[in-house]
Image (cartoon, rainbow, N blue to C red):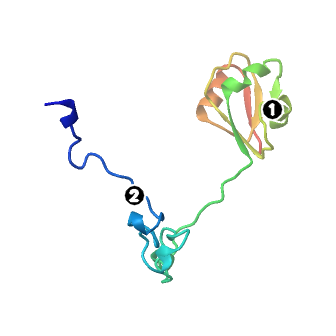
Amino acid sequence: MKIQDLKPAIGARKKRKIVGRGPGSGHGKTSTRGHKGQMSRTGKGVTPGFEGGQMPLIRKMPKRGFNTVPRKDKAVINLDRLAGLEKETAITPELLKKKGVIKKRVNFLKVMGNGEVKIPFNISAHAFSKTAIEKIKNAGGKCEVIK
């Protein structure tokens, strides 16, 4: 066996199809798209679910259930984020906004129990997790629920 006798396996290499380069290429004129019709035009193809103008199946089926609109103006904060507010005795959503702990405007604040509480806090929020209430009360603080 010599190096000049080596050839790739049959079907291992495939020549790239070059279309639209004249009749000599074998793929000129219509560029393998056929004559006329939707699939021969530029920007060909249709969106998923399109059925040629017939009413699509997804629109034939009845709607069921409902979608709740998510509340966009809520914030969730963990106890470890309150560690920098050790000097404050009463923590409110307005104070957290002023200090930059909460970035956006919020109408609902929930305190979660991830982190440790070393000093007593009086925290006002709209909701608390069970672990957050437990940790705050063990440290000697109070949880006040805002209505």
Left or right of 33 in this view: 100: right
Residue 126: where, in percent of width, then height? 73, 42
Residue placed under numbered mark 1 in the picture = 96
- The residue lying toward the viewer, choosing from 83 and 36, is 36
Question: Where residue 63 sits in the image (x, y, percent)?
Answer: 52, 73
The label nearer to you, 2 versus 1, is 2
x then y, percent, for residue 59 = 51, 77
First reached walking from the N terminus: tag 2 or tag 1: 2
Using a 10 Å C-alpha cutoff, classify the residue at mark 2 as few (fewer than 14 neighbours), some (14 to 19) or many (20 or more).
Answer: few
At label 2, which amino acid type do we have?
A: Lys
Which residue is found at the position 63% from the left and 24% from the top?
135
Give the residue displayed 59% in from the left and 63% down from the top. Answer: 67
Estimate the x, y position of residue 53 in percent, counting from the top left.
Answer: 51, 82
Query: Is 124 placed above or below 106 here?
Result: above
Which of the pair 90/107 is nearer the observer? 107
CA gap between label 2 and label 1 equals 63 Å
Q: Is residue 60 left or right of residue 108?
A: left
- Looking at this rendering, what residue extends furthest in the top direction? 118
Indicate which disc residue 17 carries: 2
Position of 125 with respect to 69 (left or right) is right
Residue at 26 percent across and 45 percent down: it is 12
Kind of residue sitting beneath label 1:
Leu
SS at circle 1 = helix
Secondary element at image label 2: loop
